[in-house]
Image (cartoon, rainbow, N blue to C red):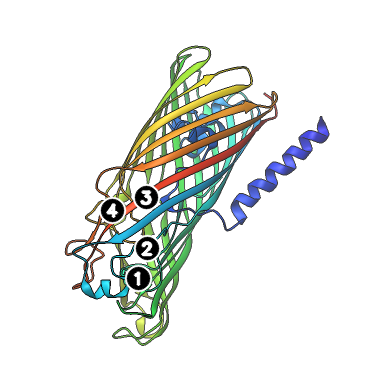
Amino acid sequence: MQILTRGVTSLVFSALLSAVMTGTAFAGAFALREQSAAGQGQAFAGAAAGSAFVGSMYWNPATMTDLDGLQFQLDLTGILPYADITPSQGTSPTLLGLGGTGSTGDIAIDAVLPTGYVSYQVNDQIWLGLALNSPFGLTTKNPFNYAGQIYARTSEVRSYDINPTIAVKVNDWLSIGAGVEALYFKTRLTQAMSPYTNAATASLEGDDWGIGYTLGFTVKPSDSTEIGVGYRSSVNLGLSGDLVLGAAKAPLPAGTYGIDATLHTPDQITVGLKQKVSDRLTVNAGFEWTNWSRFGTIPVYGNAGLTNGMKLTDLAFEYQDGYYVALGAEYQWTEQFTIRGGLGYEWSPITTTNRDLRLPDSDRIHAALGGTYQINKSLALDMAYEHIFPVGNGDIAITNGNPHYVSGLPFVGSVTSDVNIITLGLRYRFGG
């Protein structure tokens, strides 16, 4: 048994290190909610109240006080997005000269997202934890020489988040938690410098580490009810990198220029409810607010030589706040197998007024199914599948009033999109 325990411990820590060190933690969406296989199976309903087990500390560190002894959770999520953009009437004839009304094909890149968690009960009142995540990610690649190339070619965002936490059980009905968040953020954006065939590329790249924090509490008004509220702070990032111009753009000749830009990630509040209806059935609910309105227009300045202090370009977002609600349930079918499901609705920060060719997002419905197979008293396997349906107006209208609009070059089009997500997770408990 000791040999098995040491082997599992070694495997867990190796996988946790891989989650931080590998370069695969990015996906075709800017904010990544896919942080737990058990949570995924209920569309993350009740995640801030503990329904995502050890992974609930991502939303609310106080949920650790529900966990006995030393526990690990490792999840691997395959994110399979699809997005196709077709230009339509209203698009500039100059842009259509590249490819007519032909579609882009699928611009969204599949990805694998690893996450890892550790929770350790020090005594009856104090818990220590560690979460390793990728909270933001984006990879889209538009074709070379297509109608919208002046607005986007390649878009990439990667992030790595290290979050040590502590939780305190104040009494039988109240727990509180807090954590420090170390976030690495990197982005690379490219686009054509003209609307013509084989146009030169402009590339902007920058990265930085920043520090934030997480807070949370849980309240148990009865033995069958748990309410949790979690907060993830904004992280201030001073991105440094390069602007590479493949051709001259007045007043600058072609070349590489050092840049600085200040970016504030959105802070987030998550509320969860976990209600035990019977010994076998538990229902969950969740609400999430994300302060995406922090993303307005971000100026990019030169930081060396003749361009030092000169504004070289702007990153225009003009996002609105995002909201998400979810309902879910889990049922213990047998001693070894639990089934779960959930529905969620997301109000996107992106609408027709600010939608572009890098991230053609819209409001969405989340439908999820999942289950847990209890292999033995210590080891459990979580599985989940989720399909995301776009709803509402997902069209693109880069015209006068859209922050991305280039004067005289409107782009109007329709978007076809969806997302499939498959998640597997392992949870191991060393005792109480």
Q: Which residue is mark 4?
A: 319
Q: Amino acid at mark 4?
A: Tyr
Alpha carbons under labels 2 and 1: distance apart: 7 Å
- Which comes sooner in the sequence, label 3 or label 1? 1
Residue 112, above or below 62: below
Q: Please rate how many residues cluster around mark 1, counting C-alpha atoms within 10 Å: few if below 14, some from 14 to 19, many from 20.
A: many
Residue contact between numbered discs 3 and 2, judged by CB atoms under 8 Å? no
Which percent across, then down, holds residue 33? 45, 43
Amino acid residing under circle 1: Tyr
The image quadrant that residue 9 belongs to is top right
Which residue is the site of mark 1? 146
Tag 2 residue = 104
Q: SS at mark 1?
A: loop
Q: Classify residue 93 by image quadrant.
A: bottom left
**Badge nearest the viewer, 2 or 4:** 2
Residues at marks 2 and 1 touching, judged by CB atoms closer than 8 Å: yes
